[in-house]
């Protein structure tokens, strides 16, 4: 049996559709029929050759949902449900070793030194070849953690839980945001939209979203932002006045940088109150250096600056449950759908920011 997949052979050039034979499963492995694969902002960076982790040729795609069509041996999902052929599943994208310093001692598997992800660290030049989500089928390692979902679930809607949703859940975990807090979200792409949704479900009193496109700001509003500001229409000074106005002149309790822009980061620092927290999850690649006054911006403010790198299984669970609790809203997050053969158009739609979230449907 063969499966088609979209292969990145050369950076900045169209992906090539290729057929791979589906390998025989080993004990504990599962074969998943990919029903939807997410196109992430990182896929754009990878396609452009800006991600040092990747090795060509490769099958892109680290976000997916699908149906288990074959299992070798017994396997349970993270909730303890025995998995069977025909089950609809989401899975945690990061596979970790369970025995390094970060896994074993610090209990922070997201920082595992041996962590790897299908469609990022994998090449299709070596077995098992079929190793990315831009494919009809994906044979999965026995270490992959699955989440079984109800058979009638609209699977496409769950795709963003695996990367942007999980990373944002990690950001919330680290933020220690409390009910009643005022929250600022910089950037309203998938990460920012999830941040707005998590802030609302965690009882934020104010959710201020700053972004650059009207469509994305409207999306932020529909997810619960109480004030949206277009950075192309309001000056930095006007934005600051608006934030101070609704936070008793203090600044926000927690700011989430979800844009990956230096200006967004410095604005987050300037709009966070004394003793507040500034959480940065937007930078997926180096974007240069910024100026910070360690006395005024950090020390005197008793400011907590927290970086966020990828996510853990618990965060995929948090993102999945958030989506399931607001299915109709999250359905709107998927703005573009393409068949597998048109993956290049999906990458382009993400690159130009025309799409908030694009997905590939390998089986139509
Ligand atoms: Zn991603
Ligand atoms: Zn580890």
Image: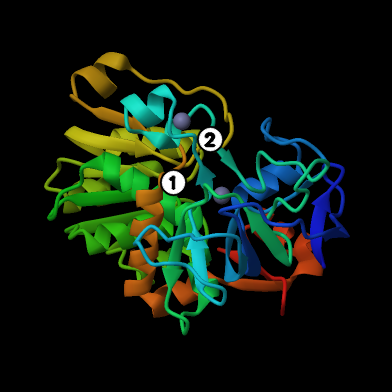
Determine which residue is flagged by label 1.
258
From the viewer's perspective, is the residue at label 1 or at label 2 nearer? 2
Residue at 16% of width from left, 50% of height from top?
181
Q: Position of residue 119 (x, y in %)?
A: 67, 48
Q: Is label 1 in contact with label 2 (beta carbons under 8 Å)?
A: no
Q: Is residue 227 left or right of residue 66?
A: left
* Element class at badge 2: loop
Q: Earlier in the sequence, mark 1 or mark 2?
A: 2
Residue that mark 2 sits on: 115
Can residue 240 be seen from the camera position used here?
no
Mark 2 lies within 8 Å of ligand 2 (Cβ measured) = yes
Q: From the viewer's side, name the closer residue of 59 and 259.
A: 59
- Neighbor class of circle 1 (other Cα within 10 Å; few <14, some 14-19, many 20+) is many
Disc 1 and disc 2: Cα gap in Å?
23 Å
Instruction: Identify the image quadrant of residue 298.
Output: top left
Whole-percent x, y for residue 118 in the image = 63, 48
Pick whichever, 247 or 197, lies toward us. 197
């Amino acid at each position: 049996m063969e499966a088609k997949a979209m292969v990145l052979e050369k950076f900045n050039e169209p992906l090539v559709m290729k057929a791979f034979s589906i390998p025989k499963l080993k004990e504990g492995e599962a074969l998943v029929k990919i029903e939807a694969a997410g196109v992430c902002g990182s896929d754009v960076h990878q396609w452009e050759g800006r991600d040092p982790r990747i090795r060509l040729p490769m099958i892109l795609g680290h976000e997916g949902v699908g149906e288990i069509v074959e299992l070798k041996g017994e396997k349970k999902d993270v909730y303890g449900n025995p998995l069977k052929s025909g089950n609809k599943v989401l899975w945690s994208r990061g596979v970790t070793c369970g025995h390094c310093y970060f896994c074993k001692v610090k209990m922070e598997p997201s920082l595992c030194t041996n962590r790897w992800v299908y469609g990022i660290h994998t090449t299709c030049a070596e077995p098992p070849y079929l190793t990315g989500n831009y494919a009809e089928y994906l044979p999965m390692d026995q270490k992959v953690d699955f989440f079984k979902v109800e058979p009638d679930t609209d699977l496409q809607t769950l795709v963003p839980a695996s990367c942007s949703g999980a990373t944002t859940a990690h950001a919330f975990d680290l933020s220690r945001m409390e009910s009643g807090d005022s929250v600022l979200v910089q950037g309203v792409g998938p990460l920012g939209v999830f941040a707005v949704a998590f802030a609302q479900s965690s009882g934020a009193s104010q959710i201020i979203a700053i972004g650059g496109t009207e469509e994305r700001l409207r999306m932020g509003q529909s997810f619960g932002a109480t004030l949206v500001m277009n950075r192309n229409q309001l000056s930095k000074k006007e934005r600051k006045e608006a934030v101070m106005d609704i936070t008793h002149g203090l600044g926000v309790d927690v700011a989430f940088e979800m844009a990956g822009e230096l200006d967004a980061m410095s604005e987050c620092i300037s709009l966070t109150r004394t003793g507040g927290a500034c959480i940065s999850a937007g930078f997926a690649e180096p974007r240069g250096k910024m100026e910070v006054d360690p006395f005024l911006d950090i020390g005197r403010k008793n400011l907590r600056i927290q970086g966020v790198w990828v996510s853990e299984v618990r965060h995929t669970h948090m993102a999945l449950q958030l989506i399931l609790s607001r299915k109709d809203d999250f359905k709107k997050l998927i703005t573009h759908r393409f068949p597998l053969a048109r993956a290049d158009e999906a990458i382009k739609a993400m690159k130009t920011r025309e799409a908030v979230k694009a997905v590939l449907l390998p089986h139509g």
